Image (spheres, rainbow, N blue to C red):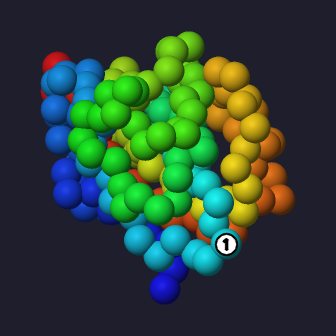
């Protein structure tokens, strides 16, 4: 069984509901995972948008959420999860708004893709402080046992 990541809010490749974006409550969608491999000591989650600022001419990948040291014995994260409700031991990194926590889709132009990437690691990572995506990826190097992705899309209505 391989590592899988799903959401009851949207199917892989489909539109993320507005409630999980800047045009709604901007809360994280519910996430569920299964198939965590034996030997996994922690999980990491990165949510990013490789289509920023314009899918027709992307210039950067915008980071929306960074979590690490998620205990591997859970089955997911509730929608709209508050930092205080994250599983014990979970650490938050910073997104590209320079803050911790989830920042939902808010694309300036066109329909963007949002990649929810889950990593099973063979280690519990040290405290990386307010780690960026790049810092977390560097710390994960050589420790990834498996990974899964869930992709959603969004285009602003207004």
Q: Give whichever of 61, 29 is nearer the camera.
A: 29
Q: Residue at x 65, y 21 (%)?
A: 130
Res 56 visible:
no
Image position of 125 with respect to 149: above or below: above
Q: Residue at x 53, y 47 (%)?
A: 70
Percent x, y for residue 42?
A: 61, 55
Screen quadrant of the C terminus? top left
In the rendered structure, the answer to whether residue 23 lies left or right of residue 49 reads left
Q: Residue at x 83, y 59 (%)?
A: 142
Res 42 visible:
yes
How many numbered marks, from 0 up?
A: 1
Image position of 94 with respect to 3: above or below: above
- The residue identified by callout 1 is 39
Q: Give whichever of 79, 38 is nearer the camera.
A: 38
User: In the orientation shown, which residue stands out farthest toward the front?
Assistant: 88
In the rendered structure, the answer to whether residue 113 lies left or right of residue 39 reads left
What is the quadrant of residue 113 in the picture? top left
Image position of 76 with respect to 107: above or below: below
Q: Secondary structure at mark 1?
A: loop
Percent x, y for residue 91?
A: 57, 33
Q: Residue at x 56, y 13 (%)?
A: 98
What is the quadrant of residue 5 in the picture? bottom left
* Mark 1 closeness class: few <14, some 14–19, many ≥20 residues within 10 Å: few
What is the quadrant of residue 66 in the picture? top right
């Amino acid at each position: 069984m391989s590592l899988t990541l799903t959401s009851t809010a949207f199917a892989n490749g489909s539109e993320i509901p507005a409630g999980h974006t800047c045009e709604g409550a901007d809360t994280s969608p519910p996430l569920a995972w299964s198939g965590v491999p034996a030997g996994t000591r922690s999980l990491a989650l990165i949510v990013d948008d490789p289509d920023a600022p314009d899918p027709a001419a992307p210039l950067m990948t915008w980071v929306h959420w960074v979590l690490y040291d998620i205990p591997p014995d859970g089955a997911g994260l509730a929608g709209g999860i508050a930092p205080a409700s994250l599983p014990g031991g979970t650490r938050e990194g910073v997104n590209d708004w320079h803050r911790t926590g989830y920042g939902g889709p808010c694309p300036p132009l066109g329909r963007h893709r949002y990649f929810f990437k889950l990593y099973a690691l063979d280690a519990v990572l040290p405290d990386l402080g307010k780690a960026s995506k790049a810092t977390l990826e560097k710390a994960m190097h050589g420790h990834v046992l498996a990974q899964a992705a869930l992709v959603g899309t969004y285009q602003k209505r207004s």
